[in-house]
């Protein structure tokens, strides 16, 4: 029996779970095999935590673990641990609202890297299963065809190369087939309640990629049901679903508006040869789209051209071209070119390709002529990859094998054998691509070590020294990640997020902090003055926990007078915020007075500076990197001049003056301070005047005694009134109230919509019942009289 007959005679049953199970199983197998071949964590010695995975996402999941276990400083609205106290709900909505994220709580805290890997693979399997589930709902077909195409989607190049170290993007990979399924329900007029709920879950899980997935699903609905009533129903479904997600989306949106501005880039289309190379397995490029998908997929999609079915090929071509054109590029990315890879919407193109491939096989496998034509359409342009450095020998070999297998499938007489052959090539291509990506990312991107026993000991030592909220404990200047306070459970100034507040970055830059990622990755600042200003009582330094000098409490009262206005010198700015002169300028010969501590500010300098036998390294290249204010040590040899760059500023810290300034401010501090997960309450000393200052950035959302908080040198402040005895301050992220209101309105609209739809479907039932009741009341029919 020909394979085509087997295909046509075995459509997918509506409730079967075989296709999603097959898709998920093949996806897990291919990803784990690829990582094992590459000797990559957790199957080998090579590191997996590259770029933002180790620097940002893993620490955020550690903070979520602490929240779920009741061990975090702060709650869902306020994070006391990072950036001296920042808004947490926007970060939560950006990185941690996936339904999969809470699964980290099931793992030991020391094994979070393992947990995050498992969650990532599980997301890829879920995306594959969701696609395999959706395909036969769009159009019936053979179950193992749906399983293979679902797995091809979950193992696309975008997933195994780009999203694998950006795990929140995987939620967009899941969202696209789910939103296409919602489109099927909209087209059929079914599930008016479940549709908006699915949209809400997708947008809550990761709004950024869900936006792209929604654009793709809307295009699919337009293609499959171009009727205005259906499109209107689809638009209402999306609007209601997005409205239900508003309690998270609105604070995130406003948080991005208040974030320190990132780099502004102009979009540049990728080279044609590189595009052709990225169609193949085992290629990698940061600035080109990861176009790879199991070779059978584009061949099947192209085979439609030779059966005179133009619609899906036209859709695929349109989406592909939109990746390369500036205006549509901006539409895909919410009208802002991203700081990193400019092709984050590539998964939508993969999804559309898979849908086109399903359209090619749903009615039966294409004939040999169509398959040969499809292979030519895909294979001939791939020859352009000969001019690209991104093409690899393994990629060429696996690509050619994929073409050969697809063309040979009609000759296979047994359906299961054909399925096994296709599955083997699929897994081989995806595993090789996974392994190649593991290798190339380590060579091209920053990487971060796996949690070790030394990290456990460091965390335990910091926990033993913890005194929050009486004082803060800083994890130290030598940082393994940009979010080390969350990773190690301390309360420091370092912080890395796409939502790092503008006021935090500018305030800390004025005080001498260093940064990476163009101001969104703030580093710790090991300086006695800033330690005093931000209530740091203990910190990690030189392999141990040290008690810092006398620090101010978390809340202080400053004497009456204007708020400080910062200038160019970080040392003078520190004095303005402290309210006392504690630095001395070096003598005419450039040397500091004996007994003072020598500090250096050279924000744009990369290199070494020295004082005697002490050498420090600085890394500055504004605006990308900014070197932090650094101590060169205590001046012990009279007249010893530090070796510093030409435009550097040197200042000499007098610790005696610093202790006197701290003692004076402690004397006027509030009598008691009670810190909560959403704010604080300070009981003032009798006769307190001036300005109450919290050593946290004055981000929008702080309200004190019913009014918006003021700013004192970039910190939260409250002007005191005569006779005032206490101050109550709470933090609510901007947009939370509006988001909750929008969510409630969307919920009411959804309830009303469902009620109206159900009312329209009921009239026939009461009429029928009324007729039955009337017949019963009339009794049995009277027989007719005989003549």
Image (tube, rainbow, N blue to C red):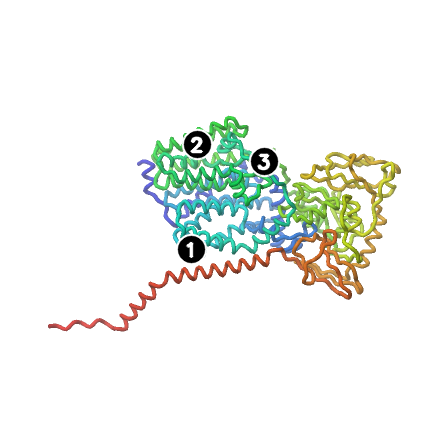
Q: Which-is-in-front pick, marks 3 and 1?
A: 1
Q: What residue is shown with label 2?
A: 378
Q: Is 551 above or below relative to 720?
A: above
In the image as oriented, which residue stretches furthest toward the left?
A: 787
In the image as oriented, which residue stretches furthest toward the front?
A: 327
> In which image quadrant can residue 693 be found?
bottom right
Task: Tell me if residue 118 can be seen.
Answer: no
Q: x, y percentage for residue 201? A: 51, 52
Q: Which-is-in-front pick, marks 3 and 2?
A: 2
Are there few (<14), some (14-19), or many (20+) residues within 10 Å of tag 1?
few
Q: What residue is shown with label 1?
A: 191
Q: What residue is shown with label 3?
A: 441
Task: Tell me if residue 761 can be seen.
Answer: yes
In the rendered view, does 196 fall on the left or right side of 662? left
Q: CA distance from mark 3 to mark 1?
A: 43 Å
Q: CA distance from mark 1 to mark 2?
A: 39 Å
Q: x, y percentage for residue 648? A: 78, 38
Q: x, y percentage for residue 284? A: 54, 33
Mark before the other along the chain sequence, 3 or 1: 1
Residues under numbered marks 3 and 1 in contact, where contact means CB atoms less than 8 Å apart:
no
Q: CA distance from mark 3 to mark 2?
A: 27 Å
């Amino acid at each position: 029996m020909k394979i085509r007959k087997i295909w046509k005679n075995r459509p997918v049953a509506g409730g079967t779970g075989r296709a999603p199970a097959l898709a998920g199983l093949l996806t897990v197998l291919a990803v784990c095999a690829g990582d094992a071949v590459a000797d990559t964590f957790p199957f080998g010695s090579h590191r997996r935590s590259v770029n933002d995975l180790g620097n940002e996402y893993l620490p955020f999941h550690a903070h979520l673990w602490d929240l779920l276990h009741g061990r975090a400083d702060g709650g869902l609205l306020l994070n006391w641990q990072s950036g001296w106290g920042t808004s947490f709900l926007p970060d939560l909505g950006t990185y941690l609202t996936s339904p999969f994220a809470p699964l980290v709580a099931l793992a030991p805290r020391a094994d979070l890297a393992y947990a995050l890997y498992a969650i990532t693979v599980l997301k890829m399997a879920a995306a594959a299963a969701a696609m395999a589930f959706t395909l036969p709902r769009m159009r019936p077909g053979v179950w193992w065809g749906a399983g293979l195409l679902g797995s091809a989607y979950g193992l696309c190049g975008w997933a195994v190369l780009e999203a694998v170290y950006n795990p929140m993007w995987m939620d967009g990979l899941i969202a696209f087939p789910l939103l296409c399924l919602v489109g099927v329900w909209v087209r059929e007029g079914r599930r008016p309640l479940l549709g908006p709920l699915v949209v809400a879950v997708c947008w809550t899980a990761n709004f950024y990629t869900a936006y792209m997935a929604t654009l793709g699903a809307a295009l699919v609905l337009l293609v499959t049901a171009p009727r205005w009533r259906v499109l209107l129903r689809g638009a209402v479904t999306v609007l209601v679903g997005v409205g239900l997600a508003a309690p998270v989306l609105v604070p995130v949106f406003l948080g991005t508006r208040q974030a320190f501005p990132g780099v502004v880039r102009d979009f540049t289309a990728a080279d044609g040869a590189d595009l052709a190379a990225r169609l193949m397995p085992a290629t990698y490029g940061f600035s080109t789209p990861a176009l790879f998908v199991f070779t059978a997929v584009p061949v099947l999609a192209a085979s439609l051209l030779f059966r005179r079915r133009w619609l899906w090929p036209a859709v695929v071509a349109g989406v592909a071209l939109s990746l390369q054109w500036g205006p549509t590029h901006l539409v895909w990315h919410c009208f802002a070119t991203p700081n990193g890879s400019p092709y984050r919407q590539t998964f939508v193109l993969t999804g559309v390709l898979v849908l086109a491939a399903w359209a090619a096989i749903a009615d039966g496998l294409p004939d040999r002529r169509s398959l040969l034509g499809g292979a030519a359409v895909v294979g001939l342009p791939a020859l352009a990859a000969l001019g690209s450095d991104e093409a690899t020998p393994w990629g060429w070999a696996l690509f050619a094998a994929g073409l050969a297998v697809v063309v040979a499938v009609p000759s296979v007489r047994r359906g299961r054998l054909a399925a096994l052959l296709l599955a083997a090539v699929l897994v081989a291509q995806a595993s090789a691509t996974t392994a190649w990506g593991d290798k190339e990312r380590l060579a091209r991107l920053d990487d971060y070590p796996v949690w070790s026993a030394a990290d456990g000991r460091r965390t335990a030592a910091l926990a033993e020294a913890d005194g929050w909220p009486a004082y803060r404990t800083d994890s130290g200047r030598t940082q393994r990640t940009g979010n080390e306070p969350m990773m190690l459970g301390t309360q420091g100034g370092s912080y890395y997020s796409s939502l790092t507040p503008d006021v935090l970055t500018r305030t800390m830059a004025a005080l001498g902090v260093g940064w990476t990622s163009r101001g969104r990755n703030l580093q710790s600042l090991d300086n006695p003055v800033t330690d005093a200003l931000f209530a740091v009582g203990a910190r990690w330094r030189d392999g141990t926990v040290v008690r810092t000098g006398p620090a101010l409490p978390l809340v202080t009262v400053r004497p009456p007078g204007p708020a400080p206005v910062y200038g160019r010198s970080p040392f003078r700015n520190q004095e303005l915020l402290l309210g006392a002169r504690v630095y001395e300028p070096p003598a005419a010969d450039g040397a500091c007075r004996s007994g003072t501590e020598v500090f250096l500010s050279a924000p744009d300098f990369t290199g070494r500076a020295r004082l005697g036998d002490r050498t420090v390294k600085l890394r500055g290249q504004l605006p990308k990197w900014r070197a932090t204010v650094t101590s060169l040590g205590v001046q012990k040899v009279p007249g010893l001049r530090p070796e510093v760059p030409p435009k550097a500023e040197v200042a000499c810290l007098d610790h005696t003056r610093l202790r006197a300034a701290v003692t004076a401010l402690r004397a006027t501090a509030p009598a008691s301070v009670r810190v909560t997960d959403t704010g604080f309450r300070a009981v003032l000393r009798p006769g307190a005047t001036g300005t109450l200052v919290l050593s946290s950035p004055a981000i929008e959302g702080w309200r004190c005694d019913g009014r918006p908080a003021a700013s004192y040198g970039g910190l939260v402040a409250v002007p005191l009134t005569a006779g005032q005895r206490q101050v109550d301050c709470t933090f609510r992220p901007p947009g939370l109230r509006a988001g909750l209101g929008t969510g409630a309105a969307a919920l009411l609209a959804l309830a009303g919509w469902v009620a109206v739809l159900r009312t329209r479907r009921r009239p026939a039932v009461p009429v029928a019942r009324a007729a039955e009741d009337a017949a019963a009341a009339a009794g049995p029919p009277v027989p007719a009289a005989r003549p």
